[in-house]
Image (tube, rainbow, N blue to C red):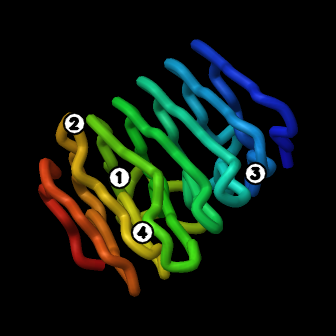
Amino acid sequence: TFWVDTALSLSGATLWMHDDAVIWILPGQSLTLDSCTLQAACATMWDGIYLDGPTASLQTNQCLIMDAEQAIVSLDNGDFQVTDTDFEHNRVGIWVRNNGGLPHPGRVSGSRFFSKPQNMLPPYAGQYGDAGIYLQDAGTVDLRPLQPNRFVKLSAGIISDHTNLLVNQSRFTELQSQ
């Protein structure tokens, strides 16, 4: 586990993630990724980036995040601002969980969520990604981006479970049932 315990910015970096690796952004801290790639270092998926509460934040711009079980996990209203980022071959791209019914601050704009069964790593090899975005008991989430988001070749583009969802300017193509 890599603990983000101070404000951290990375630009142009490639992060090779070991199986089950976690980046954990602590309360009051931020991680900014600009033109970075995060991908598995071995033949199995890594875990993901976790935002621990409402004062933890993640910004991505023009990044590629791939091979994760859940690429970004927002716990208890952890803030993410995702722009022009590609999510490839992840089980779930962004998972928003349990934020106490509050409006969620996270935004996603101009991003693409995509999977191919032949490129998915174990334990999900041969399957499509479950969802680009999964909202679970997430209060209200506003996914009305400045630039369209695209969801391609996934089992579901967005799953909204006990969540008020506002969405437009999103393209859903070639969604697959498993």
Q: Residues within 10 Å of mark 4 (few under 14, many from 20)?
A: many
Compute the Cα span from label 3 to label 4: 19 Å
Q: Give the position of the C terminus as an image quadrant.
A: bottom left
Q: Which numbered disc covers residue 146?
A: 2
Closer to the chain start, of discs 3 and 4, is 3
Q: Amino acid at mark 3?
A: Val
Task: Find residue 134 and name its label.
Answer: 4
Label drawn at residue 22: 3
Labelled disc at residue 115? 1
Total labels drawn = 4
Viewer-closest of 144 and 154: 144
Disc 1 is placed on an element classified as: loop
Q: Is residue 69 visible in this depiction of the protein?
A: no
Q: Give the mark nearer the N terminus: 2 vs 3.
A: 3
Tell me which amino acid carries mark 1.
Answer: Ser
From mark 2 to mark 1, how far is it between C-alphas?
24 Å
Residue drawn at x 13%, y 48% as measured from the top left: 169
**In terms of sequence position, does the residue under pointer 4 or pointer 1 come before the other?**
1
- Ranked by sequence position, the earlier of labels 2 and 4 is 4
The residue lying at 75 percent from left, 51 percent from top is 22
Q: Give the alpha-carbon distance from disc 3 to disc 1, as whole Å.
A: 21 Å
Q: Position of residue 48 (x, y in %)?
A: 65, 53
Q: CA distance from mark 2 to mark 3?
A: 30 Å
The Cα atoms of the two marked residues, 2 and 4, are separated by 20 Å
* First along the sequence among labels 3 and 1: 3
